[in-house]
Amino acid sequence: MTAMKQNDRWRWLTAGAVAVCLLAFTLLIGLLGWQGVRAFWPQPVDQYQFQPPEGSAVMVLGETLQKQQQGEQWRYVVKTGNRDFAAPDFRVLYSQGEAKTRRPVEVLVLQRRNGGNAYGWLVELRQDNEVMTAQSRDALLHQRLQQVHEQLRQASNIRRIEMARLNAQLESLQQQADEQQRNGSFSLEVQSEFDANRTALQRRFNVLAQQLTHLQHESQRDTLVLRDVNGVDHTIPLAQVVDAWYPNAMTLTNKTLHFFSQIWQFVSDSPTSGGGESGAFPAIFGTVLMVLLMSIIVMPLGVIAAVWLHEYAGRNALTRLVRIAVVNLAGVPSIVYGVFGLGFFVWLIGGTIDQLFFSSTLPNPTFGTPGLLWAALTLALLTLPVVIVATEEGLSRIPDNLRQGSLALGATQAETLWRVVLPLAVPAMLTGLILAVARAAGETAPLMLVGVVKMVPELPVDAVFPYLHLDRKFMHLGFQIYDLAFQSPNIDADRPLVYATALLLVVIILSLNLLAMALRHRLRERYRLMTH
């Protein structure tokens, strides 16, 4: 009875700990979701007439963030937008008595690529300074906005894909010519062929440059005139407008559609390709690609090390020393790995690679500078102890009679390892992978030293051979959270994006872990019968 009571206490203690962990995780997701996702919901826009304790009445137009009474005064926090011509775009205002408010139906909100939101009334649309007329100005606005977006998309494709491909071909052609000149094989015939090829590529590049100039000119022709709350008109190019809506006239269905559209825009847009200021696609892409590369590197190394320790090394002073070293490596601060990656991978290995294979581009480094490859290697080194420990633990759970039975039937030790032991240890390997992904995806400090940057001109993957460019720098969600929270010049506007980006990072880590867990469960069920 005493043992049963003690077991019951441990069961309740374990259940309570699990419940607390689940509650904490739920509250975390709830906080991130509420603070981050609500920023994408279209908020109503109020027009205020304040009567300050001193001075004349003040007219303000914007989204109400906070309203509270302080004695006889009222305190308002309003997002007024219009940062470029009426900064700041968040204001704290006091009114002697409650301010007069109304919600004009015709108020227009413009989401811009730079300068934040703009609030006001649409006066007119212009093309080359000529007023455009239509039965519905709203329909005309969205039609012209869609047309401008298509022109910007075509211009981006020409610049990022076609012109980038031609630039790569011109650089390759020039490198071949330089190599032939150093070897003394740059004859008149070779020079004639080189000049012809370069002229053809340059002609194609000039055609693309003319197309790009034409598209950029066409996208800048359309403008709109927005009147602010003080009656001042401002001309805004449509090329700077990401989206436009009338929040006070929207139905619940319109708001819901707009909400999902804003979320998709946040996930899929890139600031470097003409998206809004808050585009997160490069950071998402960089995070997932870095984690995948890290997994490809760390899993073979970790599994081989665990197999050697458990199956071949035996029990001696060397293996005990190696196990102690592995455990100690798991406790080293991540920034130390970043310093090691910068010194060993970037400066030593990368600098050596540049001297051997890319000497023609020096002093501009190719691999002797922080990049995607060195970031993946650094995080692989950081997560290697986790994979080794998890894999060795899985190997220790495999019954010895399976190994002995395989050897008794004539299989070699290598065949037993490959066909019996490793398949049964796959779930444990995936457990190590899950732990490695969870740690690596959230690391920021070492990445700041070995490859991550605030903004990248191009992704590590593009249409130019070799398609995956391991030498390029990349963006990361963890670093984007840090930058938005501590380095942003307009923290009030970016605070919702901090929560939204953090939620996005948690969702990506959770998705990768769930994928690995599903694969682990499937393999565990497949090999379960072999252990009985």
Image (cartoon, grey):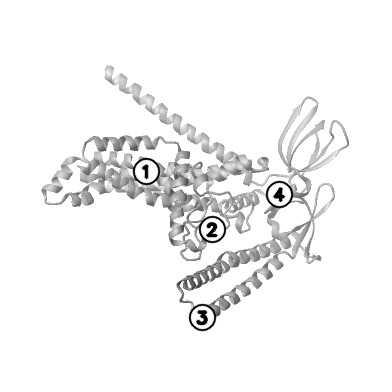
Quarter assignment of residue 92: top right
Query: Could you say which disc has been placed on residue 117 in the image?
Result: 4
Residue 162 drawn above or below residue 21 = below
Q: Residue at x 48, y 54 (%)?
A: 368
Task: Rate crowding at label 1 as few (under 14), some (14 to 19) or many (20 or more) other CA atoms within 10 Å.
Answer: many
Looking at the image, tell me whether mark 2 or mark 3 is earlier in sequence order.
Answer: 3
Q: Quadrant of the C terminus?
A: top left
Give the residue at mark 2.
Answer: 364
* Callout 3 secondary element: helix
Mark toward the viewer: 1 or 2: 2
Q: Amino acid at mark 2?
A: Asn
Looking at the image, tell me whether mark 4 or mark 3 is earlier in sequence order.
Answer: 4
Give the residue at mark 3.
Answer: 193
Q: Amino acid at mark 3?
A: Glu
**Residue 426 visible, this orientation:** no
Mark toward the viewer: 2 or 4: 2
